[in-house]
Image (spheres, coloured by chain):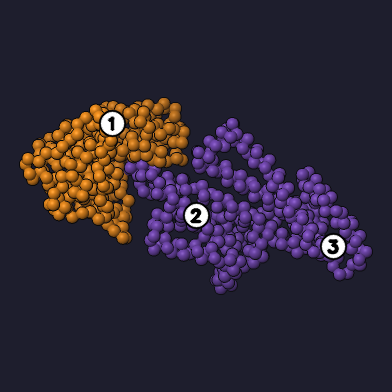
Chain colours: A orange, B purple
Amino acid sequence: MSEKVLSIENLVVHYELEAETVHAVNGISLSIGKEETLGLVGETGAGKTTAALSIMRLIQSPPGAIKSGAVVLNGRDVTGLPIRRMEAIRGKEVAMIFQDPMTSLDPVFTVGDQIAESIALHEKLSKADAMKRAEEILELVGIPRSRALEYPHQFSGGMKQRVVIAIALSCNPSLLIADEPTTALDVTIQAQVLELMKELKNKYQTAMLMITHDLGVVSEICDNVAVMYAGRIVEVGSAKDIFLHTAHPYTEGLFNSLPNINARVESLKPIPGLMPNPAELPPGCAFAPRCSYAGERCHTSKPVPRELESGHIVECLAYDDPSFQIVRRWGNG
Amino acid sequence: MIRFVIRRILFLFPVIIGATLLVYFILDLAPGDAVFALGGDQMSEEELIALRHELGLDRPFIIRYLSYMQGLFTGDLGVSLISGRSVLETYFQRLPMTLRLAFSATMVSVLLSLPLGIYSAVRKGSIQDNIAMLFSMLGLSMPNFWFGLILIIVFSLHLGWFPSSGYTGPISLVLPAFAVGTGLTANLTRMTRSSMLDVLGQDYLRTVRAKGVSERAVVNRHALKNALIPIITIIGTQLSIALGGSILTESVFAIPGVGRLMMDSINQRDAPMILGCVVLTTILTSIILLVVDLLYAMVDPRIKSQYVRRGKTS
């Protein structure tokens, strides 16, 4: 195994509201090696963003709180670090790209200023030198350096996301977290931005955590995939494991709900039902109420992770029966 | 940008015409005139009529108004009916006092409100926030002149730290500035707090935090600059109101400012003086509001690009 840039161990994050406690992340473990890209896949509300923000220690607190577990970044647990130390790590060792580029840039500062701010802070450069570096990085993401003096409102959505990427990569972080970086963009721009991220990631040898609900993006860019459901990672493995040897019924459901290119007249097969309210999770497997394979036991006892093959881990009680196999509808995705 | 400024200055003319017409009309409707104030009971009916004729008060309303406007646009605001002195001269004699009071009151209010409002927003829901809001509520509900009287009783009468009335130097302005400033503080603190709360919830601050910027810089550099527009608006409005002169506060502290001049002129039905005060205050207010608009453009590049685009020049 290569050296780990990030390893999360048994992370539990709750939002403690007055009326209820939202169990957003319920004991997830995952790790990312150098230059590796891990895709974190799941529906809206599965806890993906909460998990990512916890790595940066950016969850709104209160009400959010890391209840237990460890987030080990380049060999040190950051969950208990004083905030000053954490500020030195943010942007320098781990950077983040957010979902909506329209709202993620400060409207009253020039894009050059916004990129240079991070550089000046972490690289201890003078303002002028930082600005020079910012212009270089801007060029790297495909924006002419002359536009460094312009403000975010003078850029289109795709261009803004390029600026956000420039900010994230400005200090050459060892880990880049991308929280649905293409979701808010036009389809034509999506491919461009994704291509740019792939290119820069290879150039800078950055490890990446790619959060998405788009399996196309996953197949495009990820080495490994973790599937998240109701605050748990229900299946994790190499992209090949997940795509070709799908093990968890939920992962299967995700694939099945994609349009089938071989049977274009067929209607979509969405997963029936909704994700459980994270403030009132069922006692057994959280997916059981929507699972077509669910037996009686699934509703009462929690499944534990089980390694099917080396590195391919699934959290499903059905695999207690060694002959269990799920049915994949082929040709999807 | 320059075109924008010129347009705003041209816009001043209809505003002045509207304001003077309204005031002229109201003065005309009010019973009694300057002749009564001047001559009082000693004059005979014939003498009153003669005096009215001499001052031009017996001409029809529209003629009087037009001749006044003619004078106004040639820079002649006329002379006081009572003292016979130039209106312009009298006004500018009183203005510095009001300016001093207005600016020092605004200063007090800004220096108190911004830190208080920012702190309250950052610590929303805390005991400190609640206490700050309670005090701003008190400040809002206390009449300025009443608070001024309390200040006089405590700090002049009992402690003897500040003079109670008149103007003997900057120290005389401390109590009035606080009396007026406290009322402004209440409003401005609340506006700062709510504007900051709005901005503190924005996504772009998360991007800033993710860069490793310290929380202090997130609040003071990024959030405050974004929250500034409503704050500047309130400061501008407060300043322009204060420039009209605070009649009550100037009376309580016996400060010879524009407010007092205005009140005395009203009591004496000194129409040219009243009108002069109105016109000059209107111009002053418009200038302040123009400055506020230009400040918007400095703070927010989106507004600036609007001005530039509409004006086609920069």
Counting residues from the N terminus, which is met first, the one under dot 2 or under dot 3?
A: 3
Q: Amino acid at mark 2?
A: Met
Which one is nearer the viewer's eye here, B46 or A171?
B46
Please rate how many residues cluster around mark 2, counting C-alpha atoms within 10 Å: few if below 14, some from 14 to 19, many from 20: many
Residue bearing the label numbered 1: A265
Disc marking residue B2: none
Image quarter of residue B43: bottom right
Name the chain under label 1. A
* Residue A288, x across and y down, in percent: 18, 49
* Residue A121, x across and y down, in percent: 35, 40
Name the chain under label 3. B
- On the picture, is A259 further left or further right than B77? left
- On the picture, is A40 further left or further right than B124? left
Figure check: A331 above or below B301: above
Label 2 – label 3 distance at C-alpha: 48 Å
Name the chain under label 2. B
* Residue A158, x across and y down, in percent: 39, 32
Residue B107 in view: yes
Residue A3 in view: no
In what element is the residue under mark 3? helix
State which quarter of the image contains the N terminus of chain B: top right
CB contact under 8 Å: marks 2 and 3: no
Q: Amino acid at mark 3?
A: Val
Which one is nearer the viewer's eye here, A187 or B70?
A187
Disc marking residue B35: 3
Give the residue at the far front of this rendering: A265
Residue bearing the label numbered 2: B191
- Residue positioned 50% across, 38% down in the render: B301
Image quarter of residue A266: top left
Which one is nearer the viewer's eye here, A114 or A312?
A312
